[in-house]
Amino acid sequence: MRESGWCSRLGAVVGAAVLLMLPTVSLWGAEAPAAAAAPKAKALPDFCALLDDPEKRALMDGLLLKLAVECNRTDLLGQVRQEPAETIAGEVGTDVRVNDPSGDTSGWSTQSETSLAINETTGTICSAYNDSGLGASDIYTGFSRSTDGGATFTDRGGLTSGSYGDPSMVWRKSDGYFYLATLGSSSLRVYRSTDDCMTFTQAGSMGAGGGDDKEIMTVDNNPASPYYGRLYVLWTDFGSGQQIKSTYSNNGGASWSTPVVLSSSSGVQGAWPAVAPNGTVYGAWAAGLFTGTMSIEVKKSTDGGATWAAALSPAAGKVEPRDATATGICGRPSLRGNIRYLPSPQVAVGSDNSVHIVYTYDPDGYNTGDVVNTYYRRSTDAGATWEAEVLVNDDGTTRDQFFPSLSVGAGNIVSVAWYDRRLDPSNLNLDYYQRFSFDGGTTWEPSVRVSDVSTPVYLDPNLATCYHSDYDTQVQGALSALLQWSDDRAMQFGHNDPDVYVDQQPVSNDFLLAASPRRQSVCAPADAVYGIDVLQFQGFIEPVTLSATGVPAGVTTGFSANPVTPPGNSLLTVGVPSDLPFGSYTIGVSGTSSPSSAVHTTEVTVDVFHQAAGALTLSTPANGALNQPLRPSFTWTASIQAATYGLQVATDAGFTNVVLDAPGLTTTSYTPTIDLNSNTHYYWRVQAYNICGASGWAASFDFYTEALPGDCGTGTVPEIAFTDDFELGAGLWTHSGSGDTWALWGTQVHSGSAAFHANGTASVTDQRLVSPSIVLPATAPGLTMMFWNRQQIEAAGPGACYDGAIVEVSTDGGSTWSQLPTEVMETDPYDGIVSGSFSNPLAGLNAWCNVPVQDWLRSVVDISAYAAQTVQFRFRLGTDSSVGYEGWSIDDVVVQACVAGETPMFGDGFETGDTSAWSYTQP
């Protein structure tokens, strides 16, 4: 057996997530049993014979786990079974199955632990979940897509190799993409979908260790927030002594901030983040676990996740939920049916910046009466105080209610859902229940049963002991709360089959108002027109009288139809006079029904402008600035009455070669998400826009980016011996070797539309990509071979590789090859030695492996020892007989020397009209 990070790896079929789905190490320090599948074709160790002696086997404790795993005795794992229970009579009704069970493989068929998000632009729903039914050795995250509001879903399969579940899905408004965080083989990963949940590719990783668990992500989707578009992730780091940590990304997950430790207590787990409209970030988690007395801890950050301060605990000194019998069987806190139980909270923030939280605890003492209930609290002062606790489950029984999920909609409607056993006197069968508050958490409607069928608990013997999911999520749209959970109603392969289901709960019981659009801009004097839909629920047909509130002085309003009988609509016209000051105005729209006197409200916003956006001035990078980073921070002054800004960066003063175009910016600063070229002269400019017109481009500034290793310095210029960005095809290159997969692809590129790629397959390969013959210049100083390198290669831990990639050189036409050693790598040196345990052809060599935080790395190789010779370079990827990764990609290869020549320190063609750098005297 070999170890990958902190997760055991079994043969070519069993991945780390299967061993525990998901953490291999229990919260409580005890290792839990894991399952294996088909073993590798190798002789079993002699000590496996111990398992054939039933008397000895009965005395084994931790040793039984070790032997069962190393000897691939799956019959000895997953021994904890569900208690007897029968499905309560009923048929599938409105519940919609999210995954497609026809793709499951026998013995591996569990989908659970759900997360979902909605694209506010297209309406597409993207759902992610743990999925053992994919049948792959190290892919345990599946996802599905709905384009009809959740009426049907299409199962889109799984992510890439090394994705081990714990999914957390968000939709990012700033770019319109879905983002999905998961556990990774050697770090936490973030995937991105740029095609509306059709596919996902890895956007980056958080560079954390193999002991990281339960990562949950959120995003700042408020354009008015100072941290608009920022992704946040909170997780538990067992490798550092079990701490809650946080990190954030401003560039869509490509890179992440240095992690910050949030927790100071012991026994912490299950951190949940949320972002307020004002940009404040909250995180909540359970603390003191496995001591019998637990608390919910909350912290907040008002500076975008850089620093965190404690908020008041909404639940301190509570009894940790656990059934004595189940806990004894599972070896950790568990509920009836032998379900391991993590009492993690969920937190959300409403449109009024109120903080909402749900959590669970045992209300009446350990092992007596009620074992677990679901509770809710609200804070209207950013966590300084909490309002009275609400018992969410209104069943009046002592049966279990657990794993709550929470959402707050745009209309400040609060929804809580949870697993519920109230219908089963034996406290075993599961249903899913939900409860609304239509007034932001002040009062609550009665709970309703969401699931159409009560189901037993099925414990998959191929997964972690007592595993039956750890959390679910929900979201709200304009019309309904979309609830998602996993249950075992269906039969598959002769047993109950855990699948993911979705149901929609209308967000009203009479009518609801919805405005479209919710925001408009006008160049005064003008009219803004909004559609007001009066939506019908549960057959409600009373007339609804509409009215506008909070109307600014001088503004007129009128409805095209009033009253409106649901379902119906009216047009609200807002007349904006020329003397209404520049700014944003929010107008309330109320609807009152008669005779029931039900009232609902919505809001519309009008942004008022009077003139085209005014002039602005550029700030940084300063005009003529030197040694700027490859992702410089561009800043400029605000423009009068600006709505958005557009920034351009070009390599010429006339902006005929624009290399960066960023329109629609809502702040006066911008940092690119891609690198500019190093050692390069650039020009930049900004323009402001609003509905009345544009400001015109500000006078442009120029700057120089920093030089990197391999760049030619002052007084020298590059002499290019060879360059290939693969945009014209692969004709110059040859490739061969066992299991060769080298080919051009466009899935991941550094520039243009093509790169060369070799797959990191789960078999022994020696894949070789060979350059054409290159005549090197005689000038040795600055003689380098440079290329961009995307490595998604399996590591074996710090300084060690299972798969590996190297670069070699030949001076005799390819007859013999020498590896270019670490000491000639000026950047991105080899980071591990290839293991010899699994037949990798590169065993014992220094090589590149792992999955770096940065997507593409610039590799610069000093080849001055080969000056004036004719050489070829060989890029070589070796893989072993186990887990497969994405592999190795190469792009933008350049071979050059630096020769004497003048690099201008200053140039001015006077094309910008800016003469500020010049002075003159008149005799």
Image (tube, helix red, strand yellow):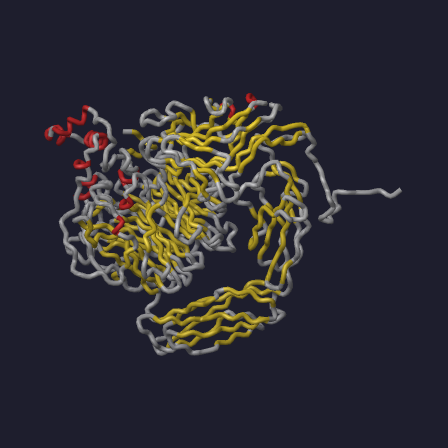
Q: How many marks?
A: 0
Determine the residue positioned at 50% across, 68% down.
Answer: 587
Q: Is residue 200 at least partly visible in the picture?
A: yes
Determine the residue positioned at 41% across, 31% down.
Answer: 736
Determine the residue positioned at 48% across, 50% down.
Answer: 229
Residue furthest out toward the left: 55
Q: 123 or 282: which is nearer to us?
A: 123
Q: 93 or 194: which is nearer to us?
A: 194
- Where is 397 relative to 781, above or below? below
- Where is 88 relative to 558, above or below? above
Horizontal and vertical percent position of residue 232: 43, 46
- Residue 177 lies left or right of residue 482; in this view the side is right
Q: Is residue 383 at least partly visible in the picture?
A: no
- Residue 835 lies left or right of residue 897; in this view the side is left
Residue furthest out toward the right: 923
- Residue 70 lies left or right of residue 414; in this view the side is left
Horizontal and vertical percent position of residue 471: 30, 49
Determine the residue positioned at 14% across, 54% down.
Answer: 86
Q: Quadrant of residue 410?
A: bottom left
- Residue 701 lies left or right of residue 770; in this view the side is right
The N terminus - image quarter: top left
The C terminus - image quarter: top right
Q: 111 or 748: which is nearer to us?
A: 748
Horizontal and vertical percent position of residue 61: 18, 31
Horizontal and vertical percent position of residue 164: 33, 41
Q: Quadrant of residue 598?
A: bottom left
Q: 592 or 668: which is nearer to us?
A: 668
Q: Quadrant of residue 54?
A: top left
